[in-house]
Image (cartoon, rainbow, N blue to C red):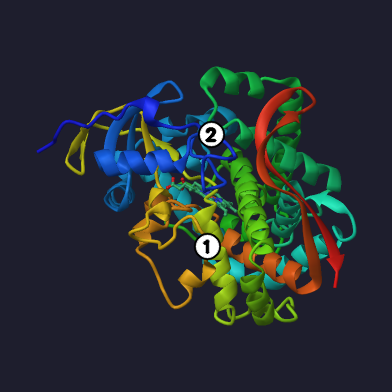
Amino acid sequence: MSTTIPYHSPDLFEKRTDSNSQVAVDFRGYTIESFLNAYRECGPVYRTQINGLEEIIIGGLKANDEAWRRPDLWSYSEAVKVFREELSDLHLTQLDRELHRRKRRLLNKAFKTSSVMENLPQIAEEIQRGIEALAGEEVELHEALMEIFTRSQSVSSIKEKIPDEMVKKMVAFEEGFLGALFLKDTERASIYSRAGYKEIKNEVLTYLHGIILKRLEGNRAEDLLDTILHQRTSNTMEPLSEKELIYDAYLLLIAGTGNTSKTLCYCLNELASNPDWTAQLLEEIGDFKVDSMARGMADFPLLKATIMEAERLFPAAPVLPRVPAEDMDFIGHHLSKGSHCLHMLTLMHFDESIYEDPFQFKPQRWVGHSYPKQAHGTFGGGSHICLGMNVARIQMPITLGFLLSNYNITVTKPPKKENYKFPNEVDSSTVRMNIRLKRK
Ligand code: HEM
């Protein structure tokens, strides 16, 4: 039987500033501490207003379990309609049910662990080359890493010599697009309608279309796009169309690079202030080589723990919008079709009953210990779990491995969410962090 959803006064939520939260990331602009208090008071489901909008907040182990176990109850297309508006109604992130299952099945070949690992040497070499090019000068690391990750995808997922200028445009497009993702409708529309943004987006999508056309004309390459295009499927499954392949090419080359980079920036900043742990890590990493990770993370328990801790403490997408596709019972509460919900998928990262000293960077907590799946929400869960998780989890340790084994790193400006001018006129937000690398 459904019970009334408790109400939590919006006045009790605190806007995050640099001084009032123990976590560097914000949760829709508010402190995670306020959401933890609300959870303790009201439980896993409650009503409130966030940034002036009526929302139903869901969070906690049970809520994660239930939300991820029954994906068909949610309308992803409604919740993330911005992807539809900006990247077409064919884009994976906004598909539901059978349409979503078809697309995940068709893309799976390029994103499963074995496919990503097949390209390990090429990915590692490209990341190493990219890092070497940064040495000596003060660099803005966030976007530099995004460029490196796009390049590393261009030697594995879609083998294509992409001009430097185009890589920069891909990063600018991704940052401009994602920076405005969760703004209010009118603010977002004003950013996406700027001439500069539209121009870059158009150039990037036209470039991706060009790649797809060449492949559809019969050009082959030994890459994951080729694998997807020429896989055997059942007769009943509609093959990927020319139009949807453009957005699939975006997934193979560009998507998620900002999230991967953001996680690493925060991680490096933490390592800089944890010299004891970093010293142990350096010892484990030793002289990091391209083939170091041929056995996955088996030889690198401390490196793995470092990444897990960075994922926990600095989730790139800590809160996601959700919309019930139909009236439903959600752990004893009635949620109406179409209501606005915010899923606090990473709330439990900061719950002390699960993670001791949850606000501290303590990678050692992961060594020889695991936590419930529902308590680690960094990549989401269920059938919509992050498509690029395996890519990110290979790029992050390789990058850290090369950086730490070969360079002394000085953080000259710690990671911070900042407004930036895009392009030359409009404010949006991204993460900025400056470092200087000195070859050891
Ligand atoms: C550390 C890096 C990353 C983080 C923290 C991250 C986080 C997430 C999260 C939280 C979701 C939502 C899952 C849900 O709705 O339950 C997601 C979905 C997604 N991510 Fe990532 N992501 C990362 C990197 C990447 C990369 C490298 C790609 C490249 C393809 C990518 C592509 C996607 C796609 C396509 C989806 C939608 C999946 C679907 O709806 O089926 N992400 N990601």
What residue is shown with label 2?
83
Task: Name the residue type under label 2.
Answer: Phe
In this orientation, which residue lies closer to the viewer: 62 or 188? Answer: 62
| Residue 309, numbered circle | 1
- The residue most toward the left is 1
Q: Quick one: label 2, few (<14), some, or many (20+) residues within 10 Å?
A: many
Task: Name the residue type under label 1.
Answer: Glu
Q: Residue at x 71, y 20 (%)?
A: 194
- The residue most toward the right is 136
Q: Is residue 100 left or right of residue 260?
A: left
In this orientation, which residue lies closer to the viewer: 149 or 226? Answer: 149
Mark 2 vs mark 1, foreground winner is 1
Quadrant into which the N terminus falls: top left
The answer to whether residue 384 is visible is: yes
What element does badge 1 sit on?
helix
Q: Residue at x 45, y 55 (%)?
A: 105
Query: What percent of the width, then of the height, locates residue 91?
Result: 53, 39
Q: Is residue 179 left or right of residue 317?
A: right
